[in-house]
Image (tube, helix red, strand yellow):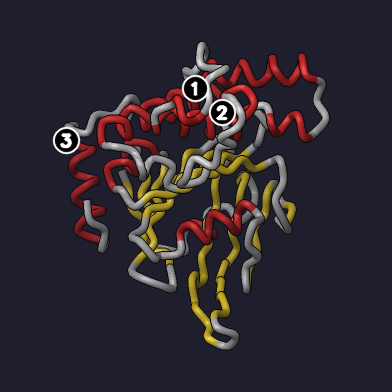
Amino acid sequence: MSVKESGVVSQEKGQDGYKIVCERISKEFIQKGTQRVHVLEDISVAVRKNEFVVILGPGQSGKTTLLRIIAGLEIPTTGRVLLDGREVTGPGPDRGLVFQGYMLFPWKTVMGNVEIGPKLRGVPKKERREIAARYIKLVGLDGFENHYPHQLSGGMKQRVGIARAYVNSPEVMLLDEPFGQLDAQTRYYMEKETVRIWETERRTVIFVTNNIDEAIYLGDRIITLQGKLPGRMHAVYEVDLPRPREHTDMKFLELRHIITEASELTL
């Protein structure tokens, strides 16, 4: 494993060879008319194609705002985001977003929730059902197509959200602390499932979390944000541990100790 100082990421190869590039992103919000809240400061991140990158930071470090800027749901105050060299100016089907909450339509079945994207794009019913069925099976929910959200566990609901994001064939998957509401056992299972799905689909993934173990278990690379607002880049960790990873592996524990000592995160 290796550690790089903040800022080095943006200088490794320039923009060449990267799927997503964040160039010196800063973000301010205006509250109560005049009060300025500085959320992000000078964030530069470059993510390779098919790489699994984890943004790790404590609460109120701006990591969700950074993900929303990459998704095109927020506009940076300064800086820009590039996807395949093109500036991101808004949301697009090339980016799939999985939220912290389940965000499912309670009146729709699993199939109805997963197929909503292709349906809105005008994909014929038979074709979109076939596509949706593929991703329902991928996330391990085949047999539950006709169940409603209230009939599902928390982990199953989040898997519906993941399938719904994948069904639009995004080039980049953005996951915002998707397992934060789950109990520890279900969370660990969903982490294993996330790796399995990523290894099957091989999309570019940016995953936000405040959990060090989760970051090490999932990421090819971990980018830490320091302190409270405004969020600033702290360090970059290359995770060269083989998959599947074990939390009791000595190298896993060593990296966990390094990150814990260098950050303000709690386990």
SS state under label 1? loop
**Mark 3 or mark 1, earlier in chain:** 1
Amino acid residing under circle 1: Val
Mark 3 neighbour density, 10 Å: few (under 14) some (14–19) many (20 or more): few
Q: CA distance from mark 1 to mark 2?
A: 6 Å
Tell me the element at label 2: helix
Q: Residue at x 19, y 44 (%)?
A: 254
Q: Are marks 1 and 2 in contact (CB under 8 Å)?
A: yes
The answer for how far apart the CA atoms under marks 2 and 3 are is: 34 Å
Q: Amino acid at mark 2?
A: Ala
**127 in relation to 230, above or below:** above
Give me the C-alpha separation between circle 3 and circle 1: 30 Å
How would you rate the neighbour count of disc 1 (Cα within 10 Å): few for under 14, some for 14-19, many for 20 or more?
Answer: many
Residue behind mark 2: 163
Q: Which residue is painted at 67% across and 27% down in the image? A: 115
| Residue, disc 1 | 139
Q: Earlier in the sequence, mark 1 or mark 2?
A: 1
Q: Nearer the viewer, mark 2 or mark 3?
A: 2
Residue 154 position, x and y percent, is: 40, 33
Residue corresponding to mark 3:
250
